[in-house]
Image (cartoon, rainbow, N blue to C red):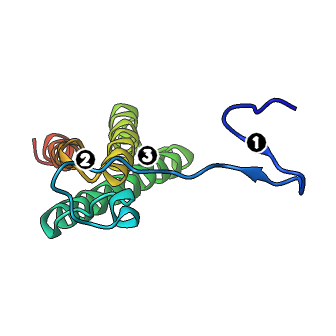
Amino acid sequence: MPPALGHQRRFSGELDLGQVHPVRREGDTRPRHAAARPRSASWAGAALRGLSGTLAAGAVVLALGLIGFQIWGSGRGIPGPGLPDVIAQSAVAVLAVGLQRFADRHPDRSGALAATGTAALVLGSVWFWWWL
């Protein structure tokens, strides 16, 4: 049987994935297994992602609360927060969670930018919808 997608079948029926040789940059003195792992983020990056994650979770809780109050108010004949507020806060929550997912999976500058965007989006929406 010819090898498919770089996998070779052994007689035991196992797939041989081959050896992975990570690319080492010039001057990198770490062992090969350490070079294969991504570098961890700094404490500042971890704190930024933690803060933005907390804000994204708060946006989700706020959106769910608004949805609940809108349903509760509609059942009692009370106007509730209003459909535009509920839709806008739900959209902010979805966007914030998406940005936070990206930030958590990219511990580099793009992840930091996404975490900053999450914080700006949530804080901007809270400022706009609640204090303006």
Q: Position of residue 95 (x, y in %)?
A: 35, 38
Amino acid type, label 3? Ile
Q: Residues within 10 Å of mark 3 (few under 14, many from 20)?
A: few
Labels 3, 2: front one: 2
Q: CA distance from mark 1 to mark 3?
A: 67 Å
Q: Residue at x 15, y 43 (%)?
A: 124
Q: Is residue 24 left or right of residue 70?
A: left
Please rate how many residues cluster around mark 2, counting C-alpha atoms within 10 Å: few if below 14, some from 14 to 19, many from 20: many
Quarter of the picture containing the N terminus is top right
Q: Nearer the viewer, mark 1 or mark 3?
A: 1
Residue behind mark 1: 8
Q: Residue at x 62, y 49 (%)?
A: 18
Residue behind mark 2: 111
Near-viewer residue (85 or 77):
85
Q: Are marks 1 and 3 in contact (CB under 8 Å)?
A: no
Decide which of 2, 126 is in the foreground and name it. 2
Which one is nearer the viewer's eye here, 4 or 92? 4
* Amino acid at pointer 2: Gly
Say which of marks 1 and 2 sits in front.
1
Quickly name the residue at label 3: 78
The disc, 1 or 3, on the residue closer to the chain's N-terminal end is 1
- Judged from this view, the residue extending furthest toward the left is 132
